[in-house]
Image: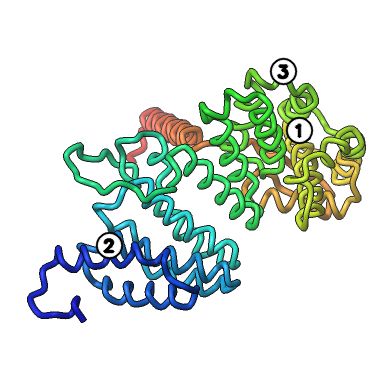
Amino acid sequence: MLSKKRAQLKQAVAEMVRLAMKYLEQTPDRETKIELIKTLCAVTEGKIYVEIERARLVRMHAKMQEEMGHLVEARNIMQTVAVETYGQMAKTEKIAFILEQVRLCLDSGDFIRAAILAKKISVRAFEREDTDDLGNKKKREEATELAAEGTPVLHELKNIYYQLMIRYHMHSNNSLEVARCYLALYQDKRISTDLSISLGFLKKICWFIILSPFDSMQSSLLHQTAADKNMDELPEHARLLKQFITQELIDWPTLEQEYAGEMMAEGDVFGGEQAEVRKSDLKLRVVEHNIHVVAKYYSRITLKRLAQLLDLPSDESEKHLCSMIVSSALVAKIDRPAGIVTFVPKKDAAEVLNNWSRNIASLLELVEKSCHLIQKEAMQYKVTI
């Protein structure tokens, strides 16, 4: 009632809300505490000068709902507040609030909304203390309220952010993004000082890069990881990366047998519900690597010989080849009646334009030569053209 009084000063309302928040820990039971939080949320709704207090109340309410097992309700409560628009909230508290929203979405299975919320945070925000949550340089004279007690510091928030992103990308089976998340954690200065943790991350980076489909980014990360100085501590993984870098055929049964122990040890990669999917992905990457090797050394090859080199049945090898052609990972033509595959070197735009220019120049030269011969014949036999 005091908050609804006409001409009530903003400072008075703000002080009343802060005073009432101190009574939350003194409530006799959970139901009374929830009712008080709901009342304070109703009082602070739509009032910019108590927006930070409202965000903290909403987080308290969501935490209590989660403790009672109402995960979806907690998620919906947290989504009623958009802290990215709060100019006076501390950067760390703002990031922590958004990460809590992302975590609740992941826990409740709402992966689409989790991805949308995660995009509100720029990774540049974790690099410097004097940037806002969007990664933009913050004005030094900007007044911000201190973060709430218990709010993680910036490097802890960075670790939480990438762990949540790993969960999201693991669900969508995006191995390249998972590798990039682990790479960001591996390159953290605070983590790089602990060799055991760094090597654990480096092992996961190796596996997830290999599990990623071939493209320019994957190839760049593969060579970058293979050149890392800590790879000397992991000879098995260094040899694995070298096999995928070297333009030689890989024998899948030998690879599977040689690295069976390493795959069993990596429970985060080859364990859980995605275990069989990851193993099939690894076999697929070996097949794709072998096709790229064949394309490098052969310009034309029969489907039968290709199947022998890949150690696969003819129909399966053709299926993998067609899949790579459709995804633009390889340029080739298949003559199915003749059973011949022709590998065409992939040309960039500049090369195509240069070939076109040379062809036009050759055509104009032939036209000019023909005109000269016609003119010569006309002059010789005195024919009027």
Give the residue at mark 3: 232
Horizontal and vertical percent for residue 203?
71, 33
Amino acid type, residue under disc 2 in the picture:
Arg
Residue with the mark numbered 2: 18
Task: Where is residue 376? Give x, y as percent.
Answer: 40, 28
Disc 3 residue crowd, few under 14, some 14–19, many 20+, Cα 10 Å = few
Q: Earlier in the sequence, mark 1 or mark 3?
A: 3
Q: Is residue 333 visible?
A: yes
Which quadrant, please, contains the N terminus?
A: bottom left
User: CA–CA distance between discs 1 and 2?
Assistant: 68 Å
Point 20% across, 39% down: residue: 139
Which is nearer the eye, 44 or 127? Answer: 44
Left or right of 200 on screen, residue 25: left
189 horizontally vs 227: left or right? left
- In this rendering, would 57 be left or right of 175? left
Q: Position of residue 255 (x, y in %)?
A: 87, 35
User: CB of mark 3 within 8 Å of CB of mark 2?
Assistant: no
Q: Quadrant of the C terminus?
A: top left
* SS assignment at label 1: helix
**Residue receiving disc 1:** 293
| Residue 98 - label | none
Which residue does the image show at 58% across and 72% down from the upper left?
68
Element on which disc 3 rests: helix
Element type where label 2 sits in the image: helix
